[in-house]
Image (cartoon, helix red, strand yellow):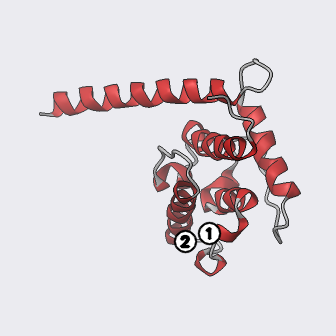
Amino acid sequence: TARNKKLILGFTWQLMRYHLLKFLASLSVDGKQITDKDVVAFCNDSIKKSDLDKKPQIKSFNDESISSGIYFIYLVASIEPDIVNWELVTDGESDEDQKLNAKYAISLARKMGAIIFLLPEDIVEVRNKMCMTFCAAVMAESYKRSGKLKK
């Protein structure tokens, strides 16, 4: 029934929220809580330091440029450059291209081992908390690879 579906969705959201809070705590290097700004800074720095031809940057997870999906593809490529087939990346101008990029970004992040909860629609509609989970998951994967992540 509709009531059971709503309860299951609520419970699932609470599980995801619990995982995310534990997950963000594990990213802390010096014991202080990780903020959205810390995640944005990590992502922007990763892209800046990469050898990629373009270096998109965002100010926050409310940044409208996120909707194209390109930022997330560049973020994944900054950690694992060989994973991206650039011929599959669109300019993200149309709704369809944005959704294709978002799907591809999610696929790439999962392929590199990140635990991803969000849907392509979350990227296209710039749902800031969900977009933050994507970036934090890629951040965690990067930390895991460098040995910074606490178990």
Q: Amino acid at mark 2?
A: Asp
Disc number for residue 102: none
Please determine whether, in this image, residue 149 is positioned above or below residue 25.
below
Please determine whether, in this image, residue 1 is positioned above or below residue 63.
above
Horizontally, residue 128 falls left or right of residue 11, namely: right
Mark closer to the chain start, 1 or 2: 1
Q: Nearer the viewer, residue 98 or 113?
A: 113
Which class describes the residues within 10 Å of circle 2: few (<14), some (14-19), or many (20+)?
A: some
Quadrant assignment, res 105: bottom right
Which quarter of the image is occupied by the C terminus?
top right
Q: Nearer the viewer, residue 143 or 77?
A: 143
Disc number for residue 97: 2
Identify the residue at image location x=11%, y=33%.
Answer: 1
Q: Amino acid at mark 1?
A: Gly
Quadrant assignment, res 38: top right
Residue behind mark 1: 92
Callout 2: SS: helix
Callout 1: SS: loop
Location of residue 107 in the rendering, given as x and y in whole percent from the top left corner: 51, 61
